[in-house]
Image (cartoon, rainbow, N blue to C red):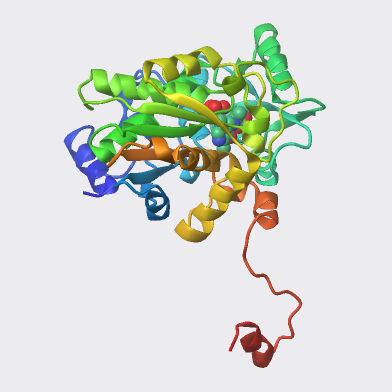
Amino acid sequence: MSFIKRLNQKASKSSGWKHWPGLIEAYRELLPVSTNTPIITLQEGGTPLIPVKTISNLIGKGVSVYVKYDGLNPTGSFKDRGMTMAISKAKEEGCEAVICASTGNTSASAAAYARRGGMRAYVLIPDGYVAQGKLAQALVYGAEVLAIKGNFDKALDIVQEISKNYPVTLVNSVNPYRIEGQKTAAFEIIDALGDAPEWLCIPMGNAGNITAYWKGFEEYKNLGKSQTLPRMMGFQAEGSAPLIYNKIIENPETIATAIRIGNPVNKINALNAKTKSKGSFLAVTDEEIIKAYKLLGDQEGIFCEPASAASIAGLLKRKEEVPKNANIVCVLTGNGLKDPDCAINNNDASFHSNLDPSLKTVAKKMGF
Ligand code: F0G
């Protein structure tokens, strides 16, 4: 049965909605909301779990690989799952402004939901290290953008202090409501597959998402909605891999700017998820990330951002360890359109420019 059919069946059985209403309504009973909570939603969540044959074939052994394509959320990343919760709760508490540090996606999402909820959004970003699409979003969504001469970790220190001293609510993943919203991705995977996958492959930056997925998988298992728990396989970019090398990276570097983070705030939770799930963390190089990014694009028609491709790069690097006949889910956290520069500079397409506008020239270029 298709994912959407399952959802609609679930819908008609439970709260009576006919179309996907957003994740808070879909999973209301498992989230910390009440009838007093104003739900600020763009109908996020309900994203597809897409089989990727090319990757399955590269691994062999009867393995089925799926991608959870969270780049199809309203602002193009998984952050919308956390933001609908964080902003709804901020609104319930009477807050008038929110703040976050961001490598780009959190700022886009925070701005969209805050403005929709009638609040101001302040976003601190590392100047020059946010992909163009994400910056464009923050501006269009009406954020007040503060670009600092420093990296994400520095920006996060500043916003944590500001939110302690001024009347603004912090909406980074230290805000527990972010984790609550994001855990619903694990629910959706189990709803689609009927059980948890053997492995969950996920990119890690500040490590909020791996924390959220693990919480979701544990909660669904405790409710009897799944029989098993996945091994949590986390991946970081080689030049920004504090969780793999077990030390703070002062000057993180990677082409995957979304995960250019040297001191993850959710480190303890990520390590807990790894230990409890018998999972494992590994670094992937920028070269491996780009290879996976191109493979998804030109073999599967799936355009994700470089940070997201780290989950596929990591799975391919761990190919030998994959158990036979396993179901594996790789999380694609963000949409490829977010980072057009990376796309233009990293593809194997043929682009013939400056052609004479004649049938003859065009047909000749086509090889006829
Ligand atoms: N993938 C993408 C596309 C991201 O934007 C991020 C984080 C991650 C993966 C890592 O998730 O931090 O929960 O481990 N982006 C944050 C931001 C830091 O500001 O947009 P995480």
Task: Relative to 361, say whether 90 is above or below.
Answer: above
Task: Relative to 306, say whether 54 is above or below.
Answer: below
Q: Residue furthest left?
A: 13
The image quadrant of residue 356 is: bottom right
Task: Relative to 159, say whether 205 is above or below.
Answer: below
Percent x, y of residue 188: 33, 35
Q: Residue at x 44, y 34 (%)?
A: 201
Ligand 1 quadrant?
Answer: top right
189 relative position to 279: left or right: left
Which quarter of the rendering shows the C terminus? bottom right
Percent x, y of residue 17: 26, 39
252 relative position to 170: left or right: right
Percent x, y of residue 228: 25, 26
Q: Residue furthest top?
A: 165
Q: Residue at x 54, y 23 (%)?
A: 207
125 relative position to 173: left or right: right
The image quadrant of residue 255 is: top right
Asked whether residue 181 appears in the rendered view, the answer is no
Task: Relative to 251, say whether 272 is above or below.
Answer: above
